[in-house]
Amino acid sequence: MDDTLPDDAWKDSFDKLLDRRPELRELNIIKKQVRASFNIDSSVENSNPDLLHISESSLHNPNFLDVGGDRFVNLKRKNGNSISTPCVKRVSTNLFHCALSPITSMKLDGLQTELVPKLSNNVKAEGRAIKHVCFEISSLENSDIQIVDDPIKNIDPQEEATGKRSRSSLVLQPGKWRKSLHTWRRTFQTDVVAPTVKVSSPRKRTTAEITRISGRKSTYLNESINLVISHEKEVLRYCEQRRPIRFDSAYAAVKMLDTCKIGEGVYGEVFKYMPKSNPSTTVVLKVIPIEGAELVNGEVQKTYEQILPEIIISQEMSNLRTNANNSTTGYVNIYNVALVMGKYPQHLLKLWEEYDTKKESENDHPEMFGNNQLFIVLELNFAGSDMSEFTFVNAEQSYYALQQIIFTLAVGEEAFQFEHRDLHWGNILIEETDKKHIDYKLNGKDLSLPTKGIRITIIDYTLSRVTVGDCCHYNDLSTDEELFTASGDYQYDIYCMMRDELNNDWSAYAPKTNVMWLSYVVAKLIDGVKYKNPKSQIHRTNLTKLKAFHKAVLRFSSASECANSFN
């Protein structure tokens, strides 16, 4: 009896697939190194690693990929027959959403789960964390791969005339987007639209290239005013200081009770504590490094000139509590602003490490800062959890929360021509209150709203626009193209709607942008936030009111006009 194995016994499933398509073996597509981090079941990138290395100049046609010489890979979609590792979890529907998505039955950012068939009950899907940033090549589709000789005839005439190629798009997580967008920029570099700065990342110890695309600007409305301002002196004046104070002295451990780190961002770190001198108050500490040469969290540090408008806006909006004609407590209360210098205090470093252990921080370790590092420290009132985490009792409570937001924006418009421009649900804080009513003053008229047990606070003025005196402070997003190609939530449509409303002139005053964000907020209240009693009659009644408001809200020209409709 012949015990010799067949000649093809050495072949695995991949090789057997390639027998039917020898041209792929010649291209050596499969034999390239597999990226193990994404090889859970299998993935497009492991089937064709070239998908992660596509330059726009190589895309003569959105359906073809140059693989060298005169050969091109046809990337037209044919569901259910991709080249990938055989897997019992395969389903008939093509779940690819981007080049980094594994083939599993997970929920992908921006993909409606109701459109994806569920796996059979006897198949268990392997767990995997959802990536917050999904990169997809908008001009390429998941595909069968075919070889063609000449794609030149398929060039889009419009692309050929303009010289523009299809660009990458991205899906960002709803809510806080800056970290996701920054990660995308570092991972998938597109056209450079501004001068770059090469700096050393203290955590990754590699050279990174950073493009500063947008930033804070201040413009005097009266062109005859031509002032030379020392931004450093202005920052010190707002801090009521003559010089920077020592970081470890101003925020020593003995002065702070029950301290913990509660958040972070590209800008810096956020801590919460109770001052020993006033333990009944809970303070949020926002620590922002400035004026340093080192790259922090992948970003160039802000300058005095860039941080000054944020300080001004924070203080002016907080001071609306005592404004004679237009007053509200709906903007976060700022207790103090300090300019400090030196290394991070040891007790804050320890808290940073505890947070990192529990939640795996994405920021650089603050031990990187030296003795000469400057920080702006904002001491803010703790105002509860953000809307995405809060659970409302019912839609009546959320309906009155919406009214609080409307009147708060209206007061800001009338006082300072205020536009928030980034009012996603992560920038709306909610806390419970025993007060039955909240008072407002709008153009000298006293108003009162029922609280229904909660108080709303608006935070984060990074993109906001205000007019204080003769000066307009705003964030110029006119060249920030990536933000306007983002998708994944209605939130990212709002940025495009704002750009159209402003004609890309971000210094202009257009209170309609506040109305656009109200449209977003009410959409989240209808279908996004959590409710304790969604089946009650009072919930259904007020949900109907929310839906009616959502249909009508974009007819208003400002939050002030919207507020007047409630009177």
Image: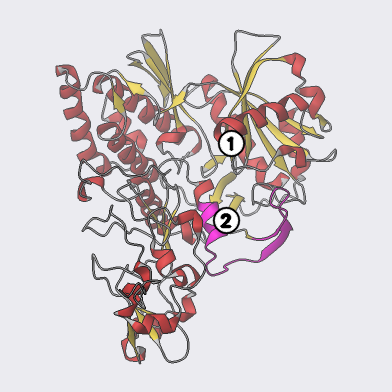
Task: Say if 103 sits above or below 397 in the image.
Answer: below
Residue 349 percent across, percent down from the top left = 72, 30
Residue 306 percent across, percent down from the top left = 66, 47
SS type, badge 2: loop
SS type, badge 1: strand
Amino acid at dot 1:
Glu
Query: Left or right: where does residue 448 sit relative to residue 548?
Result: right
- Residue 189 is inside the magenta segment: yes
Mark 2–mark 1 distance (CA, rounded to whole Å): 21 Å
Task: Say if 33 sits above or below 534 in the image.
Answer: below
Residue 477 visible in this rendered orientation of the protein = no
Query: Left or right: where does residue 520 sit relative to residue 323?
Result: left
Between circles 2 and 1, the one closer to the viewer is 1
Give the label on residue 414, or none.
Answer: none
Q: Depth check: give the residue in front, 561 or 104.
A: 104
Q: Depth check: give the residue in front, 224 or 67.
A: 67
Please report the residue visible at 53 percent of the width from the left and 38 percent of the height from the top: 461
Amino acid at dot 2:
Ser
Query: Which quarter of the figure has residue 362?
Result: top right
Residue 409 percent across, percent down from the top left = 41, 32
List the residue tagged with mark 1.
264
- Residue 378 is inside the magenta segment: no
Q: Depth check: give the residue in front, 550 or 487.
A: 487
List the residue tagged with mark 2.
214
Residue 355 percent across, percent down from the top left = 60, 30
Please report the residue visible at 39 percent of the width from the left and 29 percent of the height from the top: 387
Query: Which quarter of the figure has residue 486?
Result: bottom left
Q: Depth check: give the residue in front, 216 or 196.
A: 196
Please report the residue visible at 34 percent of the width from the left and 67 percent of the height from the top: 13
Q: Which residues are magenta?
A: 181-209
Query: Which quarter of the figure has residue 200?
Result: bottom right
